[in-house]
Image (cartoon, helix red, strand yellow):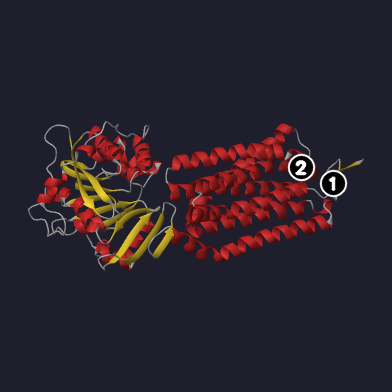
Amino acid sequence: MGTTALDRGTTVTARPPAAHSRGARFLLLFSVFLCAACGLVYELALTALGSYLIGNSVMQTSVVISVMVFAMGIGSLAAKPLQRRAVGAFALVEGLLALTGGLSVLVLYVSFAWLRIYMPSMVVVSFLVGLLIGAEIPLLMTLLQRIRRQEAGSAVADMFAVDYIGALVGGLCFPLLLLPAFGQLKGALVVGAVNAVAGVLVVLWIFRRETRRVVRTALLAGVAAVLAVLGTVYALADDIEITARQQLYRDPIIHAETTPYQDIVVTRSTAFTGEPDTRLFLNGDLQFSSVDEYRYHEALAHPALSGKRSSVLILGGGDALALREILRYDDVEEVTLVDLDPAMTRLARTFEPLRELNGRALADPRVHTVNADAFNWLRDASRRYDTVVIDFPDPDNAALAKLYSVEFYHLLRHVLHPESQVVVQGGSPFFAPKSYWSIAATIGEAGYRTTEYQVDVPSFGNWGFVLAVPGTEGPPPSLRLAEDAPTLRFLDDAVLDAATVFPVDRRPRDVRASTLMDPVILEYTNQEWQNY
């Protein structure tokens, strides 16, 4: 049989050599599996980072996926001339992909923190990663055919079956293993290292007899350099992340962690009053300042507690500051707190600055904590509560928007008595009036009578709430304090009387109620808060 030069320094016979066996084919398909898993992790890491840093998860996901899929098509076309040198080309592509994908989170985080060019950087990184992923399949198909000739349809079926299974495993490993164990930055670096080993070393081992020593040496040196870069960055990752994250916050960071659900940061400084100012940020959004958080939490909790309150449900509020206010009533017999993120409730229970602020509320024997998605938890809830306090972050992504939907408030009816009172934090009527009045309209659409009110919280500005009772017949709920309310630092009946008066330019708007299928609250929130 004649021979054909397919690679510089590589000669392949027209018939598969004896050295290529079922074991070699299995090893190559296993390499396909690992590379597919790594590719999907890169995609998920980019979309998750964008959601954490920018919000608007639908937009972030759409941009990343569309740019990457487009780039994959370009990469597949660009790989056609490389098929004649498939071994070296594939090793080079995988080395570059491991380096680009592994460093992608770091590059974007630095672009956001220091350079403030996140969106252009995200497009460029997504394009490069997609370009390299797209070049994989044509080259892998060529290598697979070298081991054993197949009909085109059978070869494509085998290749894509393994590729899709790898994508499934990568998609599950990202939230269940990589994020909890390594976090986003280190997780991407670990995946990059796996990508380098799977894509370069495995292929070079399978085709070692067909590749000249100088070529193998050069490729091995290249992958060693990639692993060295990734390993060095991994060793420095904590310092890099701390330095970059500090760029985003005015005050010194005293705690920071990234969970599968959100980025949690606590800062501390000395306020203008001379008091310590502890601040909690979730995904970069301020949740409270210890200097004036009592204004927010008194306004949130106490009006709803003016009626019967032996059993109370808190949805959200994992910092336990609203819980602190509720526990000031001796006749509260039990409180159930449902918060999605166990890291948040653990922090509120064990982190001393937060424990001190919430008065160790989570240690109270009347409190039962549940870490679950509030929407799904309500679907299975069977008991009823006298009072419900809803303290979710603003609905700036799809996961939060469902918690401000007509369907969510319908589910809430299942845990209420006819006389139960519900209070919802509704954002700022001043900075985001459409969002605020949409929340009120959504609650009304779900069959509640509502009373809207607003107070001033210096750290937030003007902030609004909605007090609601189930049913459409009868007067709206009365905004008042209980006769046996504890002594409060900010709130009294006179403040509440004034709180129901909205200035002319911030009175009810012509807005729509938000539903699962039409989450207009997400559109309103992202539109109104984008300039703040």
If you read the primary sequence from the N terminus, does the residue marked by circle 1 or circle 2 appear first?
Answer: 1
At mark 2, the secondary structure is helix
Residue 247 appears in which quarter of the rendering?
bottom left
Residue 123 percent across, percent down from the top left: 55, 44
Residue 511 appears in which quarter of the rendering?
top left
At mark 1, the secondary structure is loop
Residue 261 appears left or right of 44: left
Determine which residue is flagged by label 1: 17
Residue 343 percent across, percent down from the top left: 38, 58
Which residue is depicted at the point 60% across and 49% down?
Answer: 38
> In the picture shown, does residue 339 fall above or below 436?
below
Residue 259 appears left or right of 141: left
Residue 481 appears in the picture as rendered: no
Q: Amino acid at mark 1?
A: Pro
Residues packed near mark 1 inside 10 Å, few (<14), some (14 to 19) or many (20 plus): some
Q: Is label 1 or label 2 in front?
A: 2
* Dot label at residue 82: 2
Quarter of the image with the N terminus in it: top right
Closest to the observer, 240 or 113: 113
Closest to the observer, 249 or 95: 249
Residues packed near mark 2 inside 10 Å, few (<14), some (14 to 19) or many (20 plus): some
